[in-house]
Image (tube, rainbow, N blue to C red):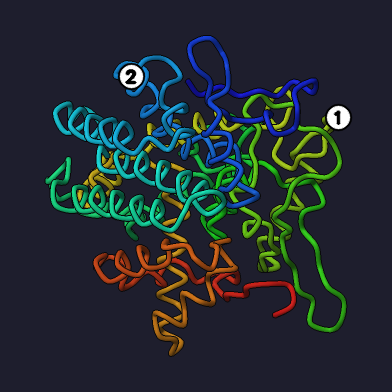
């Protein structure tokens, strides 16, 4: 099972998400596997990589007996490992209860292949390594030819259409008669929405911002940027601690003077005087939690006018708005702006990689490019995005 250890008496390697058996003993090879994953992963990202491995371990416990999967890997027992892999494949093929059975099967295969490859590099003979390669190639073929889920699903378009963006921003403007939030919460909600909408930050990145996150340069042409990084001033008291997804997520993001002034106005006049240094404060003077952001967007979704909700459902198949929808919307808008300024889609995506905190190997830009061409509503996306922050800068050095 997946557990999270945070106690300081635990060795550093055991802190955060890890897999344990029914007795609470860590799964040996899962620890090794986690150690070789890319460094700087957020806890939630690491947990998402370990969950399918945990499912594979639990299946092996039922088939072979508790702890026997680690023993088979240690003994390099390819016959037994092959039996477990094939049995696991058939079990998820027959169940079909989850949305992504293919990803669970591939995660199990990648886990076995990664660990065995590392073992053989150190101790195995050339013949044994060739045997391993042939075995794994066979399982790769099994995966590619006998997919567990043959249904083709369209890539969801999560960017908000023009007919939704405008009314939502107007509704959330502080003092609006249609604003669904109490007066003391309206500025907090408005700043959250504007930062996510204009900069496409991840929810965790927003919640990590410190009160001095807005920085500005000197000179005749004054420039502003937002530092996306871990709050260095204090230990985070929240139970679900937001964190950067990878080290590529730590970055400066240029902002317009309008958005910088908006954030600073909130911090000076509407944030209150809590005893913590996180920018986004809750109504009880604690750092706002991820659950708190979810509740805010649930309330926004409930307050949508019927016509706006109908347009949202027609374009996206949903009747609610989430923080990540605003990230999708921002990406599509930035792509549209850069294309209209003469940039190719490939060139625009390279500009946007550091802006949105994507790693050089991330496949997310190609997914957004596909959504950009498929989403006809985005053709006129600049019509209501004529704000100063529409100018794209990528890093402080480019300012």
- Label 2 Cα neighbours within 10 Å, binned few <14 / some 14-19 / many ≥20: some
Across and down, in percent, residue 217 comes to: 83, 73
Q: Quadrant of residue 102?
A: top left
Image quarter of the C terminus: bottom right
Instruction: Name the side, left or right, on which 178 lies relative to 243.
Output: left
Q: Residue 2 in the image: x percent, y percent?
A: 50, 24
Give the quadrant of residue 182: top right
Q: Quadrant of residue 292?
A: top right
Find numbered disc 2 in the image and state the secondary structure of the residue it sits on. Answer: helix
Residue drawn at the location 53% of the way across and 68% of the way down: 360
Q: Which residue is painted at 45% across and 33% down in the image?
A: 75
Q: Say which of 129 and 338 sits in front.
A: 129
Front residue of this view, candidates 222 and 143:
143
Mark 1 to mark 2: distance in Å? 54 Å
Residue placed under numbered mark 1 in the picture: 275
Pointers 1 and 2 in contact (CB under 8 A)?
no
Instruction: Check the image and report above or below for 38 versus 57.
Output: below
Q: Return the residue nearer the eye: 339 or 370.
A: 370
For the view shown, which residue lies furthest in the bottom direction? 342
Q: Which residue is mark 2?
A: 64
């Amino acid at each position: 099972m997946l557990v999270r250890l945070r106690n300081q008496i635990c060795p550093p390697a055991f802190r955060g998400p890890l897999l344990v058996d029914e007795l609470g003993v860590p799964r040996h090879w899962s620890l090794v596997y986690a150690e070789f994953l890319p460094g700087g992963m957020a806890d939630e990202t690491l947990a998402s990589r370990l969950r399918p491995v945990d499912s594979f371990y639990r299946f092996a416990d039922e088939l072979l007996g508790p702890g026997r999967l680690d023993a088979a890997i240690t003994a390099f027992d390819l016959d037994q490992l092959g039996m477990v892999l094939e049995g696991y494949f058939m079990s998820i093929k027959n169940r079909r209860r989850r949305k992504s059975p293919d990803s669970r099967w591939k995660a199990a295969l990648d886990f076995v292949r990664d660990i065995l490859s590392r073992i053989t590099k150190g101790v195995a003979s050339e013949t044994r390594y060739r045997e391993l390669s042939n075995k794994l190639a066979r399982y790769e073929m099994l995966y590619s030819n006998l997919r567990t889920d043959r249904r083709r699903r369209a890539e969801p378009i999560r960017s908000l259409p023009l007919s939704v963006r405008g009314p939502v921003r107007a509704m959330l403007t502080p003092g609006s008669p249609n604003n669904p939030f109490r007066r003391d919460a309206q500025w907090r909600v408005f700043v959250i929405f504007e930062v996510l909408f204009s900069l496409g930050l991840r929810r965790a990145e927003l919640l990590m911002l410190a009160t001095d996150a807005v920085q500005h340069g000197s000179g005749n042409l004054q420039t502003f940027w937002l530092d996306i990084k871990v709050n260095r001033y204090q230990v985070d008291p929240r139970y679900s601690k937001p964190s950067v997804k990878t080290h590529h997520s730590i970055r400066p993001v240029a902002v317009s003077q309008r958005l910088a002034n908006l954030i600073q106005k909130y911090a000076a006049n509407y944030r209150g005087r809590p005893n913590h240094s996180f920018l986004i404060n809750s109504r009880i003077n604690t750092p706002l939690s991820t659950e708190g952001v979810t509740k805010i967007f649930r309330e926004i979704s409930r307050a949508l006018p019927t016509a706006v909700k109908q347009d949202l459902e027609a374009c996206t198949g949903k009747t609610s708005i989430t923080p990540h929808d605003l990230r999708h919307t921002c990406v599509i808008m930035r792509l549209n702006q850069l294309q209209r300024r003469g940039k190719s889609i490939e060139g625009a995506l390279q500009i946007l990689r550091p802006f949105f905190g994507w790693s050089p190997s991330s496949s997310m830009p190609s997914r957004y490019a596909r959504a950009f061409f498929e989403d006809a509503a985005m053709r006129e996306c600049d019509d209501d995005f004529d704000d100063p922050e529409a100018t794209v800068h990528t890093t402080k050095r480019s300012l």
